[in-house]
Amino acid sequence: MSFQTSALILSWIAILLLALVVSGLVRQVHALTSGTAGRPGSVGLRPGAPAPGFRDLAPPSPATLVLLFLDSGCATCEHLLDEVAERAPRGDVALRVLYRNAAPAGAADVPVTVLGEQAELFDRYDALATPFAVVVDATGRVRRSEPVGSRSALRHLLDQVDQVDQVDQPSGGAPGPAVHQIQRGGAR
């Protein structure tokens, strides 16, 4: 067999293998776009659901509670912890930082309550991925439950919580009958 014949046979084999790979990729793209591939379900508790462990986590006075679920091995979580350290909660907003395992040493310097070894709460709040935030109103009901993937997303969430709490507090200081539009999903 000549060199040219061998090269021609190898070229055709390579072309057939490439065609099989492209065919598989086309099928995967089609499955993803048509929705036949499994899509992840919603994570977190639904708005209006009772917040698990609210009595143990809630501040002494009625206030909005923001739970921030973090992981010590997550770089984004470290950035969010820095954001929490720079921005102490204002007004009637209490912030709790929860870790599935032990909290990292740097978390002790943050001016909010940091709780380690909270795997049960991660499961009960359906916080499958970190960083994840849950906003609980003063009555112990979940207001929002969503992933927060950046410092700006956390800042946006905390700003919205602050704005809603200012609407809730009429001049007498008691919570008012404000109606809230519940949003799901991350910051845009």
Image (cartoon, rainbow, N blue to C red):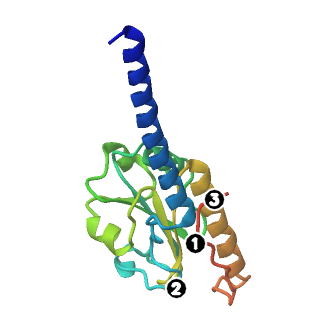
- The residue wearing badge 2 is 48
The residue positioned farthest toward the bottom in the image shown: 177
Q: Secondary structure at mark 2?
A: loop
Mark 3 lies on a secondary structure that is loop
Query: Which residue is depicted at the point 52% across and 82% down?
Result: 138
The amino acid on which the numbered mark 1 sits, given as a three-letter code, is Asp
Q: Quarter of the image holding residue 163? A: bottom right
Residue at the image point whose x is 42% and y is 76% from the top: 58
Picture quarter with the N terminus: top left
Whole-number angstrom distance, CA of label 1 to CA of label 2: 20 Å
| Distance from the alpha carbon under mark 3 to that under mark 2 | 20 Å
Taking the spot 63% from the left edge, 85% from the top edge, the residue there is 175
Where does label 1 land, which residue? 92
Q: Nearer the viewer, residue 100 or 24?
A: 24
Mark positioned earlier in the residue sequence (3 or 2): 2
Q: Quadrant of residue 54?
A: bottom left
Residue topped by disc 3: 187
At 30% across and 52% down in the image, what residue appears? 103
* Up-down relation of residue 147 to residue 178 (above or below): above
